[in-house]
Image (cartoon, rainbow, N blue to C red):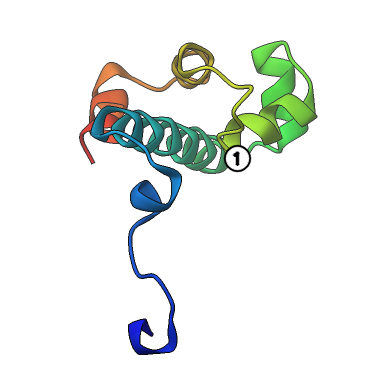
Amino acid sequence: MKAGGWAVGTPQDFLGLSDEEAAFIEIRVALAVTLKRLRCSLELTQVEAAKRLRTSQSRVAKMEFADKSVTVDLLIRSILRLGGSRKLLAAAISR
């Protein structure tokens, strides 16, 4: 690809992220994936999860997508509110 004039690199390089910024994004995504897996393991729809979390279905979708408008705090509180444990959070963050 380099011979064809394409630049090869990581998303971190492309976006110009520091190591800390890249790690933070990885944590946010890991928490979003954990929230979705937890919801699915509980056999809840996004609507049902939204009722338990006292929010909207669209907000749950944004949480599961790790939308930039969703804070890490909200992801953590939502996982805990759905019955997730500190151990589950630690496993998500340590991946």
Q: Quadrant of residue 44?
A: top right
Nearer the observer, 15 or 33 = 15
Residue drawn at x 20%, y 34% as measured from the top left:
94
Tell me residue 35's x, y (percent): 50, 32
Nearer the observer, 25 or 40 = 25
Q: Amino acid at mark 1?
A: Phe
Tell me residue 13's x, y (percent): 34, 50
Nearer the observer, 13 or 48 = 13
Q: Quadrant of residue 36?
A: top right
Q: Quadrant of residue 68?
A: top right
Please tell me how crowded label 1 is: few (under 14), some (14-19), or many (20+) other residues with Cα within 10 Å.
some
Residue drawn at x 46%, y 18% as measured from the top left:
72
Quadrant of the drawing holding the N terminus = bottom left
Q: Is residue 10 left or right of residue 60?
A: left
Q: Is residue 85 left or right of residue 83?
A: left
Tell me residue 66's x, y (percent): 55, 34
Residue drawn at x 78%, y 30% as measured from the top left:
58
- Badge 1 marks a residue whose secondary structure is loop
Quadrant of the drawing holding the C terminus = top left
Instruction: Report how many numbered discs are placed on residues in the image.
Output: 1
Return the residue at label 1.
Answer: 65
Tell me residue 18's x, y (percent): 29, 33
Q: Is residue 46 left or right of residue 8?
A: right
Up/down of 57 relative to 51, above or below = below
Nearer the observer, 8 or 63 = 8
